[in-house]
Image (cartoon, rainbow, N blue to C red):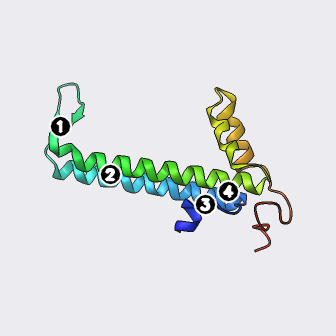
Amino acid sequence: MKQFLFSAQGRFNRAKFWKAVLYYIAAGVVVGVLALLLSMIIPSQVAEDGTYSVTGVAAIPYLILIFGYFIALLWSGIAVGIKRYHDRDKSGWWVLIQFVPFIGAIWYIVETGFLTGTSGPNRFGSDPLAQ
């Protein structure tokens, strides 16, 4: 799993890319459930307008949970995107296309999620479909 989600070496086909996306969704659900369980354990305040807040030391478990999830998701997302671009025989730097306003995110999802990779081996490794 560590090599699958957190290493930028090698190539990913579309099926592995979408499998990683499903892992991210499942991890988000788990983090949401853990946050809900924390809210039942840790004392909190609910304002008249319905907003929920935790202050002081009681907020530390939430911060650890959310920032840990964010860092893992960011690192893994970059690594998976790089491997997907490698399958398309492009540099991993192409993941930065997401920062281009309006078109960047669309370009990224089309290129990584829907377009096929190069057939046979390329400069980044062997064909993931041949394995």
Residue 74, percent across and down?
A: 50, 48
- Mark 1 and mark 3 lie on one chain; the one further toward the N terminus is 3
**Is 104 on the left-hand or right-hand side of 52?**
right
**What secondary structure is marked by label 3?**
helix
**Is 3 on the left-hand or right-hand side of 116?**
left
In this view, the residue in front, 18 or 94, is 94
Q: Residues within 10 Å of mark 2 (few under 14, many from 20)?
A: some
**What secondary structure is marked by label 4?**
helix
The residue beneath circle 2 is: 65
- How many angstroms separate mark 3 from mark 2 (CA)? 23 Å
User: Which-is-in-front pick, marks 2 and 4?
Assistant: 4
**What secondary structure is marked by label 2?**
helix
User: Which-is-in-front pick, marks 3 and 2?
Assistant: 2
Residue 15: image quadrant is: bottom right
Whether residue 44 can be seen here: no
Kindly check if marks 1 and 2 are in contact, taking CB atoms under 8 A apart as contact.
no
In the image, is residue 94 above or below residue 101? Answer: below
- Mark 3 and mark 4 lie on one chain; the one further toward the N terminus is 3
User: Which-is-in-front pick, marks 1 and 3?
Assistant: 1
User: Which-is-in-front pick, marks 4 and 1?
Assistant: 4
- Mark 2 and mark 4 lie on one chain; the one further toward the N terminus is 2
Q: Name the residue rendered at 65%, 62% in the picture.
A: 9
**What secondary structure is marked by label 1?**
loop
Query: The disc labelled 1 sits on which kind of residue?
Result: Thr
The residue beneath circle 3 is: 19
- How many angstroms separate mark 1 from mark 3 (CA)? 37 Å
Residue 33: image quadrant is: bottom left
Residue 23, percent across and down?
A: 52, 59
The residue beneath circle 1 is: 55
